[in-house]
Image (cartoon, rainbow, N blue to C red):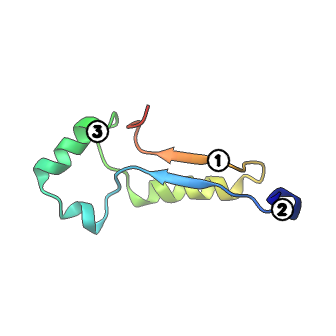
């Protein structure tokens, strides 16, 4: 329906990201999360921004949710 008006709808579903909030977590808690993430680290904010840019720049992608979580939900 939106495509007829050149409207696309996509979303980014980020995992754990290095932010002021996550930096306040205890080191123990951060390590617990990192052990669950296959890439063993939190995302940098720029990595999430890269995913957003990709979805914006590609005019043929619509109706997608891009999970950017270091492989956590594989």
The residue that label 3 is drawn on is 40
Residue 63 coordinates in the image, percent (x, y) = 69, 49
Instruction: Return the disc, 1 or 3, that comes first in the chain's sequence.
Output: 3
**Element type at marker 1?**
loop
Give the CA separation, mark 3 to mark 2.
39 Å
Q: Nearer the viewer, mark 3 or mark 2?
A: 2
Instruction: Return the disc, 2 or 1, that comes first in the chain's sequence.
Output: 2
Residue 2 coordinates in the image, percent (x, y) = 80, 60
Indicate left or right for 32 with 5 as reference.
Answer: left
Residue lying at 23% horizontally and 36% vertically, measured from the top left: 35
The residue that label 1 is drawn on is 64
Give the CA separation, mark 2 to mark 1.
16 Å
Residue 10 coordinates in the image, percent (x, y) = 64, 55
Quadrant in the picture for the N terminus: bottom right
The residue that label 2 is drawn on is 6
**Element type at marker 2?**
loop
Q: Nearer the viewer, mark 1 or mark 3?
A: 1
**Element type at marker 3?**
loop
Residue 11 coordinates in the image, percent (x, y) = 58, 55
Residue that protrudes farthest toward the right in the picture:
4
Residue lying at 38% horizontally and 55% vertically, measured from the top left: 44
Quadrant in the picture for the C terminus: top left
Indicate left or right for 49 with 62 as reference.
Answer: left
Q: Residues within 10 Å of mark 2 (few under 14, many from 20)?
A: few
**Front-lying residue, 52 or 13:** 13
Instruction: Return the disc, 3 or 2, that comes first in the chain's sequence.
Output: 2
Task: Specify the label residue 38 is tagged with.
Answer: none
- Tag 3 and tag 2, C-beta contact below 8 Å: no
Residue that protrudes farthest toward the bottom in the picture:
20
């Amino acid at each position: 329906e939106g495509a007829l008006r050149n409207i696309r709808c996509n979303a980014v579903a980020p995992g754990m990201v290095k932010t002021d909030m996550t930096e306040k977590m205890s080191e123990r808690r951060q390590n617990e999360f990192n052990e669950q993430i296959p890439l063993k680290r939190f995302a940098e904010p720029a990595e999430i921004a890269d995913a957003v840019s990709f979805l914006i720049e590609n005019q043929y992608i619509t109706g997608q949710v891009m999970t950017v979580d270091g492989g956590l939900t594989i």
